[in-house]
Image (cartoon, rainbow, N blue to C red):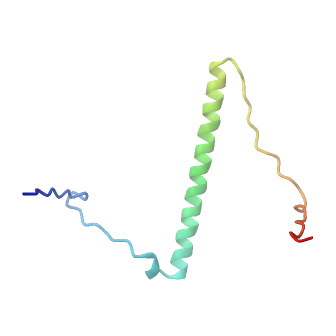
Amino acid sequence: MTNHIIIDPGAGAPQERAPRLQDRSDAELQALINEAAALLAERAAKRKQEAIEQIQRLAKEQGLNVKIDKPKRRRGRPPKVKPANS
């Protein structure tokens, strides 16, 4: 005999089902992409800031001061790419 346990994750609350990506319009998909890209950028910035803070904290524990600067942006045009078969 097999017993089955059913767990209700919504605790009685009705669950909304998100429409499939194939059923969304181009505008909805573009908005979703933009929102996801912004969220990913925000998370990356947060992780970077936390890493910098951790590095500075560890350095301070060892009696060191660490300053982390943003890399300088290069100005002007990027270098030309040479053709592969020349």
Q: Is residue 66 above or below residue 47?
A: above
Q: Position of residue 68 (x, y in %)?
A: 73, 36
Tell me residue 81's x, y (percent).
Answer: 88, 66
Picture residue at 56% right of the left edge, 69% below the top = 33
Q: How many marks?
A: 0
Q: Is residue 80 above or below residue 50?
A: below
Looking at the image, residue 17 sits to the left or right of residue 46; the answer is left
In the picture, measured across the screen, residue 21 lies left or right of residue 6, that is: right
Quarter of the figure with the C terminus: bottom right
Q: Is residue 23 left or right of residue 82?
A: left
Q: Quadrant of residue 57?
A: top right
Q: Nearer the viewer, residue 85 or 81?
A: 85
Residue 13 figure quarter:
bottom left
The one nearer the camera, 66 or 13, is: 66
User: Residue 42: horizontal and vertical position, in percent?
Assistant: 58, 53
Q: Residue furthest top?
A: 63
